[in-house]
């Protein structure tokens, strides 16, 4: 099946620093990727839709200057949490749509960010 | 607008007992329906999906879900659960056209008791 890989799977950083999370589609080309955030024991909240070669579309309430998304190729999207603060600590999950498979999204393993 | 409701946040059940996890949705357009499972500190794995055709869909590990259009439901069932089924289960829907973003329910924590 289609594989989506995230890196790193976990990261700890100091407050004020920036952290980059990568999302790769390993065996298909993804023109669209999605970034979600999940708080403990809660559902996934869509943060933004990442479109290859164009600007990401952010959901209401998500700061685009805080969460920078780049989708420079058909197999890679990155999420950069800039000037991270403890409240940014969360589980971030990316997903990608395989154009060859109707409707289904494939998810990465998730990246747990802890900001001290 | 779409919404997905999972009424039960937690479902404890004894091993080998049957289980049903409920999911209802609302949408003014046709949708695809999914169940995803999440194990601790992991991403989501697709359990099963309904796109079209038979309203009863099955997974390889014994789960099944039935799309009921009149009741706008897509409940997940398993006749006999195992300890390894303990996980968080998310129901999700997407539009049949467009970006195919998923809208998730709040999740149901299934705990199988030995």
Image (tube, coloured by chain):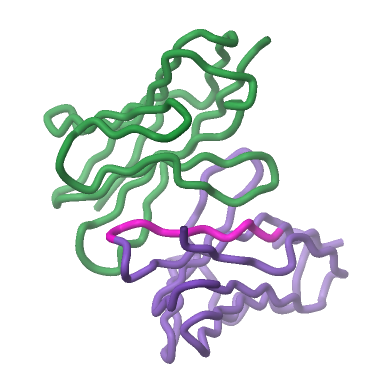
Chain colours: A purple, B green
Left or right of A53: which side holds A62?
right
Q: Position of residue A54 (x, y in %)?
A: 41, 90
State which region is magenta.
A102-111
Residue A105 highlighted magenta (yes or no): yes
Residue at point 15%, 50% (across, down) = B30
What secondary structure is the magenta-colored segment mainly?
loop
Residue A7 highlighted magenta (yes or no): no
Q: Position of residue B103 (x, y in %)?
A: 37, 51
Name the foreground residue: B8 vs B87: B87
Left or right of A29: which side holds B39?
right
The quarter holding residue B102 reads bottom left
Left or right of A77: which side holds B75?
left
The quarter holding residue B58 reads top left
Residue at point 58%, 26% (across, down) = B85
Q: Position of residue A99 (x, y in %)?
A: 32, 71
Q: Is residue A11 above or below residue B47?
A: below
Q: Is residue B21 above or below residue B55?
A: above
Left or right of A98: which side holds B25?
left
């Amino acid at each position: 099946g289609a594989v989506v890989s995230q890196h790193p799977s976990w990261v700890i950083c100091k407050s004020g620093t920036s952290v980059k999370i990568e999302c790769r589609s390993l065996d298909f080309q993804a023109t669209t990727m999605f970034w979600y955030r999940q708080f403990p024991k809660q559902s996934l909240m869509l943060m933004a839709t990442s479109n290859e070669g164009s600007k990401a579309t952010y959901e209401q309430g998500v700061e685009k200057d805080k969460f920078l998304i780049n989708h420079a190729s058909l197999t890679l999207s990155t999420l950069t949490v800039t000037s991270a603060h403890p409240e940014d600590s969360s589980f971030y999950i990316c997903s990608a749509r395989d154009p060859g498979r109707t409707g289904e999204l494939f998810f990465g393993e998730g990246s747990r960010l802890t900001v001290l | 607008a779409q919404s997905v409701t999972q009424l039960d946040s937690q479902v404890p059940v004894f091993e080998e007992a049957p289980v049903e996890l409920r999911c209802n949705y609302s949408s003014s357009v046709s949708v695809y329906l999914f169940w995803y499972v999440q194990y601790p500190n992991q991403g989501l794995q697709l359990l099963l999906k309904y796109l079209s055709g038979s309203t009863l869909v099955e997974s390889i590990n014994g789960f099944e879900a039935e799309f009921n259009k009149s009741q706008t439901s897509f409940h997940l069932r398993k006749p006999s659960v195992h300890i390894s089924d303990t996980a968080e289960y998310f129901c999700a829907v997407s539009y049949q056209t467009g970006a195919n973003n998923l809208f998730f329910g709040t999740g149901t924590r299934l705990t199988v008791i030995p």
